[in-house]
Image (cartoon, helix red, strand yellow):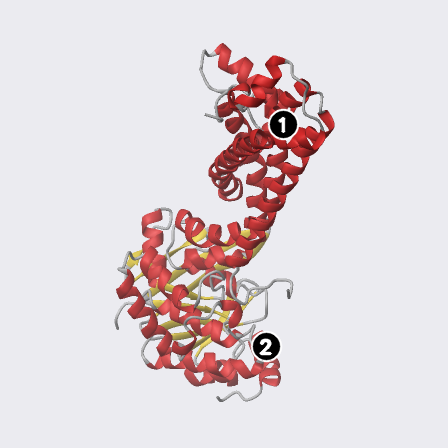
Amino acid sequence: MFLGPSVFEGVPAEFRERIFRGDRMPEGLTAIADALPYLLQGSAVTLVVVAGAMALGLFLGVPLAAGQVYGPPALRRIIGVYVWFFRGIPLLVFLFLFYFGLCTALDINLSAFTVAIIVLGLISSAYQSQIFRGAILSLPEGQLKAARALGMSDLKAIAFIILPQALRLSIPGWSNEYSIILKDSAVTYALGVAEIMARAHFVATRTYQQLPLYLTAGIIFLVLTWIGTKSLRALEERVRIPGYSPHGM
Amino acid sequence: MSEPILRIENVSKRYGRKDVLKGASLDVNRGDLKILIGPSGAGKSTLLQCINFLVRPDEGRIWLEGKEVHYHHKRDLYAYRQKVGMIFQDFNLFDHLNALENVRIGMVKVKGMARAEANERAVMELERVGLKEHMQKYPAQLSGGQKQRVSIARALAMDPKVMLLDEPTSALDPELIGEVLSVIRDLGNNGMTMIMATHQIGFASSLSSEIVFMEDGQIIERGTPEKIFFDAQNARTREFCSKITDLYGEKRG
């Protein structure tokens, strides 16, 4: 299965044979055409990593944001430290720290693929929490007051009144976060995750077709960014509150 | 004489070193319409928000129907707030919900009412404020007067014992004030107990049971509309009343 830890597993048989027999290597467009199915499988890996990380970031980021806005002072400080920590250390350092450091030290057996999702997700949760926090703070204070006046607990008010509005306002920031995680996911190639970059690198170093292959990898990323941001823009339109146009658009 | 439905005793609030409310006390009987008047910054809004603890008073006690509100207990607080409807100057409708959902959400999420039943009641309340045909519209698609009427329907749907109205017409265009006042007038005629801060003294003098003049965080003077508007004891009360009479026209509404 192409989600597996080894980059080599998914290499098409024909292509693999050619590498090992030492035949004349394909060049230019042929090289791209030969490697494309293999790279596209990699984009599926990339998308699963990105989706997993975004989901984890959302799952953690929402309570972090709510806690940082509405929580008691001690909780706010703890969340502040969390955000500082995960925004302050480079992704590559985290990946190595987690995969080679923590997993080895604690004798946990996690695949590079899983570690990639966890690390990208944790980092994203710090960034996403700030997207949501900004959105929550932009809502008029009266929304919470009105909810409380009806007898809602703060938890209910946050769940039914604040978040449905704040999440809508977060979509543009979220779209930004998507394009950043998408590109960051290429770094996980350093752990051997069989994503786009790892595969492009694998083929490029064996066929000596660096330019066409890295170019193809770049174009795949561009297309994925375009599809993702377009979809989120469509989502933004879809969930837009009728008549609500803060900037007269 | 029956006991007051709402009893407010010695409520105070400080922000930093500023006393915004200095020991206000008020007894409200069933069916009363108390009108709070006074210059801005007098503490009218703070008093109203202290009454349902949207602003935590530093001191003071409150009884509803003879039972003291233990607002430090969340369960007590939430139960009490359901019985005290609040109308805000700037409406505070939930922007992501249409008129019907705005009225329904409290019944469903707070009272745990079944959806169908809540829906029926919400339609009824919107009909009462004359907005049945607009129930699918979102706040951004409604006029200010319509928004305020939805917010009144939202409060009424919770079956409140008392309604607090914090300058409900101050954010409205002049030609929209009438439709909101007429809804409030109907409420009063149907026996709803209300405390309302307003500058609409024509409305106040024709309907209210008592006018309460506040200044500088204190209740300065109270009495019937006749007494406050024509025969006030306090010089500041007289001065304020003559000013707002000039501004808002007719004393007798």
Q: Residue furthest front?
A: A23
Q: Which chain contains the residue that carries disc 2?
A: B
Task: Identify the residue position indicated by label 1 in the image.
Answer: A197
Residue A84 appearing in the image: no
Q: Are marks 1 and 2 on the same chain?
A: no
A146 lies above or below A74? below
Q: Nearer the viewer, residue A106 or A232?
A: A232
Is the residue marked by circle 1 packed among few (<14), some (14-19), or many (20+) residues within 10 Å?
A: many
- Residue A146: x and y in percent read 45, 60
Cα distance in 3D space between marks 1 and 2? 76 Å
Residue at x-position 32% and y-position 79%: B190
Tag shown at residue A150: none
Name the residue located 64 percent from the left edge and 62 percent from the top edge. Answer: A247
| Subunit under mark 1 | A
Q: From the viewer's perspective, is residue B82 above or below residue A72?
A: below
Q: In terms of image quadrants, where is residue A108?
A: top left
Q: Nearer the viewer, mark 1 or mark 2?
A: 1
Q: Residue furthest right?
A: A211
**Residue B240, label in figure:** 2
Amino acid of disc 2: Phe
Q: Does dot 2 land on a helix, a strand or a loop? A: helix
Q: Amino acid at mark 1?
A: Met
Above or below — where is A34 with respect to B238? Answer: above
